[in-house]
Image (cartoon, helix red, strand yellow):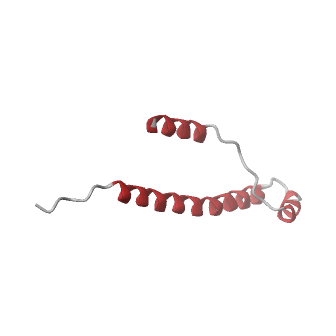
Amino acid sequence: MKRRIVYIMLLLMLFTIPVEAQCAMCRAVLESEEGQKTAKGINNGIVYLMIIPYVLIGLVGYFIYRNKKKTPASDS
């Protein structure tokens, strides 16, 4: 069952869609630029900064799960 969930999560990560993370004001200013390299860079930066908290929370959750699952050592 757990492997199935992991496989489903991996499959969902493979089929992601591109996201646009710019606010309306930033988009209006950056769309006027020729080539839109700056707009793509800012969009990638926003997405990058948005992902970091989720990764950190996931790591904390994983370590809590791992510590709860450990069995206490016997005192022999």
Which residue is the extreme one toward the front? Answer: 75
- Asked if 12 appears above or below 37 in the picture, the reply is above
Q: Is residue 58 left or right of residue 72?
A: right
- Asked if 35 appears above or below 17 in the picture, the reply is below
- Asked if 51 appears above or below 6 in the picture, the reply is below
Looking at the image, which is closer to me, 11 or 33?
11
Q: Residue at x 58, y 59 (%)?
A: 54
Q: Residue at x 53, y 62 (%)?
A: 57
Looking at the image, which is closer to me, 42 or 2?
2
**Quarter of the rendering containing residue 44:** bottom right
> Residue 61: image x %, image y %?
48, 59
Looking at the image, which is closer to me, 68 or 52?
68
Q: Is residue 29 left or right of residue 42?
A: right
> Residue 42: image x %, image y %?
73, 61
> Residue 37: image x %, image y %?
75, 56
Q: How many marks?
A: 0
**Quarter of the rendering containing residue 43:** bottom right
Which residue is the extreme one toward the left? Answer: 76
**Quarter of the rendering containing residue 13:** top right
Quadrant showing the C terminus: bottom left
Q: Residue at x 42, y 56 (%)?
A: 65
Q: Is residue 31 left or right of residue 5?
A: right
Q: Residue at x 45, y 39 (%)?
A: 2
Looking at the image, which is closer to me, 69 or 61?
69
